[in-house]
Each structure stands twice: as C-alpha cells, then as structure tokens.
Image (cartoon, grey):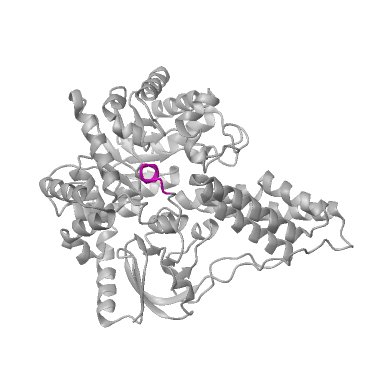
Amino acid sequence: MQNFQGVGVSPGRVIGTIRQMPKPVSEPPSGEQLAASISTEDAIAGLKTAAQSVHDELKARADKASGDGQKVLEATALMAKDTMLLKSAAKLINKGTSAERAIWEAGASVSEMLHNLGGYMAERATDVLDVRARIVAELRGVPAPGIPASDAPFILVAEDLAPADTATLDPLMVKALVTSGGGPQSHTAIIARSLGLPAVVAAHGVDDIPDGTEVFVDGAAGSLTVEPTEEHRTAALTWLENAATLAVFDGHGTTADGHLVPLLANVGGAKDAAKAAALGAQGVGLFRTEFCFLERDTEPTVEEQAAAYKGVFDAFPGKKVVLRTLDAGADKPLPFLTDATEPNPALGVRGYRTDFTTPGVLERQLEAIATASRESEADVWVMAPMISTAAEASRFASMCDAAGIKTPGVMVEVPSAALTSASVLRHVGFASLGTNDLTQYAMAADRQLGPLAELNTPWQPAVLRLVQLTVAGSLEEGNGKPVGVCGEAAADPALAVVLVGLGVTTLSMTARSLAAVGTVLRTVTLEQAQELARLALSAPDALDAKAWVRAKLPVLEELGL
C-alpha cells in the first residue's frame, strides 16, 4: 500500500481510478526557422489570428461559467491577447524564427519575468505557459491541451492544472483532484472548493502513478493511497452518506449554546449571488467587484457598474451584502488604472492605493454603489482592500460619506492594519479579515508556491495572533465594531471554530462550504470554541495547531471533514 502525502484543500473521501492529465504540447525544435514559402508578415498575421482564436474560445467558455471559474477564464483569455507576449514573438519572427518557436520562446521569457517578480504576478506565469501551448496547438491545427475524456467518472491527477482547465471541470465526471505541485491558494485549490470536489495539492510523486490505478483520496487529510483497504472503502461510503447532509445549510449559523455566527457567501456577480442565496447564505461577506472591470480597456460607466451591482443586491433583499471596492493591481492589472511594470506588484499600487495614482475611479465606483443601493432592499456595506493605516481608513470613510454610503469598512490583509486595528476601526464601521493575503504578507510566503505550502496556511499561530489583535482592537475604547473573515480560512470547519473563539463575528466562504461549517459550529459552545482558540495560539507551529484542534473535534473525523 503506497501513500502520498500532500496538502488537503477541499474535504471529501473517494475511491476511484485515476486519469493523468495528457502530456503537454511538445516544444517546437530549438532554432526552428520560418519556412521560405511564408513571409514574416503572413507568419505574424497567422500568429495574431491563432492568439485571437484562443482568446475567443476561452472567453466563450468564460461566458458560460460563473464565479471563480469565470474570473479565471477571463484572466487567461486576456493573456492570449497580451501585447508584451505577442510583440516579443513578432520580433523573433522578424528575425526568421518560426511562429511556433517564436511564441514558445516569448512565452518562456514573459513567464520567467512574472515568476521572478513574485507575489501575485507569479500566479500569471502559469497562465502564460498555458496560453502559449494553446496558441501552438492552434497553429498546428491540433486539439488544445486539456482534461482527458472519459466514459466513466475518474480521479484527475496532474503536476498542476492550468487555470482554464480547472475553471471548466465537470464535477459529475471528476471525483477528486490531486496535483504534485501548486499550493493551498492555487487555482486548482480555489476551483476545487467552489465545486465541492475533494482535492489535494503538493503531493509529490503522484504524477508518476499509472493511469487506471485505483486509489483512495482523503481531501481533508491531504493524502492519496494506492490499493485501498476495506477501511478506506467504508470511509468513502460514509462520506457519501454524509455528503447529502453537508450539502444543505438551514440558514442559521450558531454554536451549540445559541451564540449567533452569521454564515455569509463570497460571490463575484449576480449568478454567484443567486446560487448562494439558494444554498441558504445569510448574506454576502465578500462581493468581488473586479468582474465588472475585466476585459476592458476603459473604465465602465457609473450606470454600467450600478446595474451590475444591483443584480447581486437583489439576490439578498433585507440582508447584508458586503462589497469590496475594486482590488486592481498585482494579479489583476487594468490598462486604465495600474502599472504593469512595477518591480514588486504584490507590494505595489493595488486596491485602495490605486486612488493615489489614478484618482476618480474609486469615487465613481462609490457613486455607482450608492445608486444601486438606493434602488435595492439589501443592507449594503462597503469595504476597501489593502488599507494599511488609520489615515487611509479615515479618508475612505469620508469618501463613502460623500457618496451617501452609510456603512464603510476596511479589509484587514496588511499586518499593519491588524496591529493598529483600534486606530483603524475608529474611523469605520467594520473590518473583514482577508486571510489569504494576511497569511502571505505575515509569513513572507508566496501563496501559489507548493514548496511553501506549510508556511502559507492561516493555521500559523502568527496569523491567528493577528486575527486576535484585530478583534481586540475592535473592542478598545468601546468600539465594539464587527470583525468578519472572508478569506479561505472561513471555509475550513475546524479553523472556523477557532476564529469564532477568537471573537470573529461573521464568516464568509464559498457557498458550498456553508453547510459543513454550520454543522461543525453547532457541535461546540462558545466557551469550547474559545478554549480551542487558546490551544491553537499556544501551538509552536501550524501543523501542531491544526492537529491539536482537530483532535478535540471528533465530529470532523466522523464527517470526513
């Protein structure tokens, strides 16, 4: 019995046969020259046509997708038209290089540049390599790389999955995802959680397992086992029985002793909001507004934005909808707003900071939010990303007041905001912890890198301490401001208990996680949650923090979470 250990990113216990992702598109021969019968002009035109076809195909798939999948596909489609990529390839063609070899070399250069920049820009490196393979396939007239076809459900195994592949997974055919690379916040992890698929990342060696091998995957434990035992088969059957229960949330987040913890959903648009409402979400804890700005060379009008926002607000009449203002920059560059040449975009002009360099965009967005809010029945709260100081919080609150927005707030994802939360929250009505970025910045660990997966987890005691400090600051001087969590940490049922114990007032997550989190919360009292929070804070590292807490929550093992 062979066991592979990785990082569990989405719970579930399944048995099935594996299918390996097909080998990638082969590299064009080094030094391959342009055929004598083809002019450089025709070769460049053909390359642009192939790139446009790849863009159009990805965009068409994006239009049929929703949520995280839609955003990933849209971002990848944009990369197919990236001017830096195409201009670099054109220069090589003008020197006599074949179109296939030119886009291959250009893609390698752009990818390396993005990877070396680190942080969010490093996430785009994979997108470039995916896009170049698709363009080469288009030039060759062969199918683009993708998920293998199968007549029966299977467990998909790969070194890593391209964003465009993870975004269009069919959960009826793919029973689980296992990759040898990637990290807990990779595209694979995020999409797996949104689809409710058991998933394990950073499981080194799994891409060498032969096709057709029967395996047992435990998404919570982060393991894959070859030659499952009867015990494994029983565990998989139990998971199937529990899955029906864990798919239904009754719309009431509470601990065993009646302490209310509203469970909200993270959404990216009206389709997401409608699905979240149908799954019982008690509101929206993170409405990402970037979708309205993607695929554009110019800023959307106030009217266009207001119409898009109202679609989300209307899904939750009378309930709280927390909207995050535009989080542009880093991995979400916008031609009319951000500088793609920044040496370190993760630490650059992004989120709220874009108002320093391009004033007016945020003001107009707030105007659109206020307009949509007046035309809906939702209780609209608005928060700014990447707030670092009390002065920034004060200025944002003033901007909201001028726009007629009643409840301004801040994202706490920069450690300085957590350390000075009392001062920051003095100026606004609430805070929401973005644990993905907070962890990345606190641990100085790129959240996409598999080798850093153990560092890049919100179970790190240092990160939990920052959560505790944020809550403590909210209570100073009688502030009593609500502090929620909208990062991926909230979707982990065990960590959700710890967060409640630390004093977090609301939890927001992918809608598919609501039932599991709600089920586990109802098994503990507030006092027990506080005891588990103290236990996690006392741990020497993230592994012990997680293990110690899980050992005190037997319901997790019973449910396979």
Looking at the image, residue 7 sits to the left or right of residue 547; the answer is: right
Question: Image quadrant for the N terminus?
Answer: bottom left
301 w.r.t. 177: above or below: above
Q: Nearer the viewer, residue 14 or 351?
A: 351
Residue 539 horizontal side relative to residue 411, left or right:
left
Q: Nearer the viewer, residue 490 or 65?
A: 490
Q: Which residues are magenta?
A: 436-445
Q: Is residue 99 visible?
A: yes
Q: Residue at x 55, y 55 (%)?
A: 126
Q: Position of residue 263 (x, y in %)?
A: 27, 45
Q: Where residue 81 appears, x then y in whole percent?
A: 66, 47
Q: Specify the quadrant that holds the C terminus.
A: bottom left
For residue 160, side relative to residue 81 (left or right) = left
Q: Is residue 360 magenta?
A: no
Q: Left or right: 40 with respect to 479?
A: right
- Most prominent secondary structure in the magenta stretch? helix
Q: Residue at x 69, y 68 (%)?
A: 142
- Looking at the image, the residue that sits furthest to the right is 37
Instruction: Tell me which corner region of the image, top left, top right, bottom left or bottom right, holds residue 171.
Output: bottom left
Q: Position of residue 283 (x, y in %)?
A: 31, 41
Above or below, 97 relative to 498: below
Q: Nearer the viewer, residue 84 or 65?
A: 84
Q: Measured from the top left, where is residue 267 in percent x and y?
A: 40, 44
Query: How many marks overall?
Result: 0
